[in-house]
Image (cartoon, helix red, strand yellow):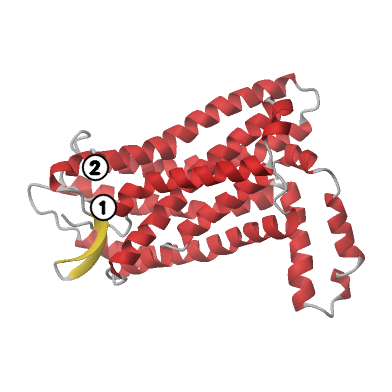
């Protein structure tokens, strides 16, 4: 059994007759590395800025801040694996069995962690708007930290099968980093992994979004002053919609690839088309880790002001000490916009 893909999320079917896919591999070796490089650079810079702004400027004063921080960490965890998969796409796996397992673990924990913290952010918005009185007691920093620790434990448990079954070994003339399921349980584990990804990565967040946003919309319709609460729901709603636009195509292609026989696609030509679709949709899905910081900048009004504060305080003052226009009253005016209570900031924009 040989895994032709460059990602631990991709699984190869066994055909009755050999199906040569040299053209698919050649395309992947030329196309994927530069795309992965762009994702790494933009994703790392964006999420690192979110991380620093939340730590340095917002000081993690609310449960929402805790979840946003963990979402950024999930994206960073996902991103640091991409240079290795980029090299794998261009050549072969040269990093050994330990890194094969470790990076696969990071990859899946970054993915599932991102899903779970987006779900928690959605529930957080639901509580803040629909159950505002209860939320004052429940939405604390301590509870945010506790639920984040539990979420990371669940994430590790969910990612465990990928870590156990993945390994690096020499197959033919090249070393690979691919899943190797027990032959007696091969079909079960292959189907289980794909169904797990679709259920946890697509169905679960969709169900949570429908339930929470139905309640939020009903509450907003009863509210006279809707402006602030519309801002509150907008950020997380955009995050969720963007998530589905980027990840749903990949989940659907994974489902078709795993159940090729059921969909009548278990022939060489169809398999090659699915491989190409996998390359395109997986690359699209990977770029999602670059999008959340952009959403914060364009949708989160207060985040833009915090980013401005961070830029003036830690960047301009350090690299442009002789630029008086960026000092004194300018920075004070920017900083003075954050004198309101944490609760009011949190409910008005979600940031």
Q: Residues within 10 Å of mark 2 (few under 14, many from 20)?
A: some
The quadrant of the image that shows the C terminus is top right
Relative to residue 49, is residue 342 depicted above or below?
A: above
**Residue 9 visible in the displayed image:** no
**Residue 348 visible in the displayed image:** yes
Viewer-nearest residue: 46 or 20: 46
Q: Is residue 67 left or right of residue 263?
A: right
Q: Secondary structure at mark 2?
A: helix
Residue at image coords 54%, 43%: 117
Q: Are marks 2 and 1 in contact (CB under 8 Å)?
A: yes
Residue at image coords 84%, 76%: 323
Residue at image coords 19%, 36%: 264
Q: Residues within 10 Å of mark 1 (few under 14, many from 20)?
A: some
Viewer-nearest residue: 223 or 73: 73
Residue hosting label 2: 189
Q: Where is residue 152? Give x, y as percent.
A: 49, 47
Q: Where is residue 252? Give x, y as percent.
A: 35, 39
Q: Where is residue 296? Give x, y as percent.
A: 65, 50
Residue hosting label 1: 165
Q: CA distance from mark 2 to mark 1?
A: 10 Å
Residue at image coords 78%, 43%: 342
């Amino acid at each position: 059994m040989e895994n032709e893909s460059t990602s631990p999320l991709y699984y190869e079917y066994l055909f009755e007759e050999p199906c040569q896919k040299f053209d698919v591999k050649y395309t992947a070796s030329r196309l994927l590395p530069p795309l992965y490089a762009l994702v790494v650079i933009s994703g790392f810079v964006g999420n690192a800025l979110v991380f620093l702004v939340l730590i340095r400027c917002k000081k993690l004063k609310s449960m929402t801040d805790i979840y946003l921080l963990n979402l950024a960490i999930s994206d960073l965890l996902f991103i640091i694996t991409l240079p290795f998969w980029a090299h794998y796409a261009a050549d072969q796996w040269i990093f050994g069995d330990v890194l094969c397992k470790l990076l696969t673990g990071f990859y899946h924990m970054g993915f599932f962690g991102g899903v779970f913290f987006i779900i928690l952010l959605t529930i957080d918005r639901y509580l803040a708007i629909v159950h505002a009185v209860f939320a004052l007691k429940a939405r604390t920093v301590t509870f945010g930290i506790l639920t984040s620790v539990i979420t990371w434990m669940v994430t590790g448990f969910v990612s465990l099968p990928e870590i156990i079954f993945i390994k690096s070994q020499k197959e033919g003339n090249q070393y690979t980093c691919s899943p190797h399921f027990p032959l007696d349980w091969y079909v079960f584990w292959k189907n289980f992994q794909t169904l797990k990804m679709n259920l946890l990565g697509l169905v679960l967040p969709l169900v949570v979004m429908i339930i929470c946003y139905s309640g939020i919309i009903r509450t907003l319709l009863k509210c006279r002053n809707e402006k602030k609460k519309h801002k509150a729901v907008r950020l997380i709603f955009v995050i969720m919609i963007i998530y589905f636009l980027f990840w749903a195509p990949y989940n659907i292609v994974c489902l078709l690839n795993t159940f090729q026989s059921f969909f009548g696609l278990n022939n060489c030509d169809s398999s090659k088309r699915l491989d190409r679709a996998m390359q395109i949709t997986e690359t699209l899905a990977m770029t999602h880790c670059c999008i959340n910081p952009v959403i914060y900048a364009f949708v989160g009004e207060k985040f833009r002001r915090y980013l401005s504060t961070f830029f003036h305080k830690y960047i301009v003052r350090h690299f442009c000490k002789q630029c008086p226009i960026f000092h004194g009253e300018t920075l004070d005016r920017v900083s003075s916009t954050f004198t309101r209570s944490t609760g009011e900031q949190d409910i008005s924009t979600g940031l």
